[in-house]
Amino acid sequence: MIHDLILAAQTQPEAAGFILRGIKGIFVAIGSIIAAIICAIIAGFKGRSAIGWGILGLFFSIITLIVVIVIPSKKD
């Protein structure tokens, strides 16, 4: 299957664009999952909802990571 995609990319330039967009999408998805896990861990240590911050981290990765680092802890 991959061999067919490589051959198609050589003969059809638009096929190479599809392949690169797919690879980019995989990296974005992996980065979002990693950011969600990190946000959930930090929020859990600060006494906040790990699930809620994890979901926010999945969709708004770096912005949520910055916010969860900056917000104060709820623990006394």
Image (cartoon, grey):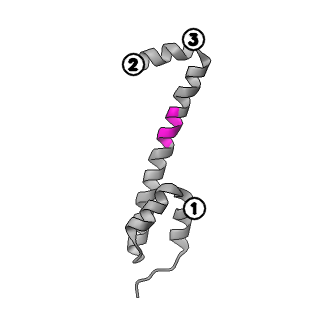
- Assign a secondary structure to mark 3: helix
Q: Is residue 35 above or below residue 8?
A: below
Name the amino acid type tagged 3. Thr
Q: Is residue 9 above or below residue 50?
A: above
Residue 52, magenta (yes or no):
no
Q: Is residue 22 above or below residue 5?
A: below
- Assign a secondary structure to mark 1: helix
Left-right relation of 44 to 57: left
Which residue in the structure is indicated by mark 1?
Answer: 63
- Assign a secondary structure to mark 2: loop
Name the amino acid type tagged 1. Ile
Residue 37 place in picture, x, y as percent: 40, 58
Quarter placement of the C terminus = bottom left
Determine the residue positioned at 52% across, 14% down. 8
Per the model, the C-alpha gap separating discs 2 and 1 is 38 Å
Name the amino acid type tagged 2. Met
Which residue in the structure is indicated by mark 3?
Answer: 11
Label 2 close to label 1 by CB (< 8 Å) = no
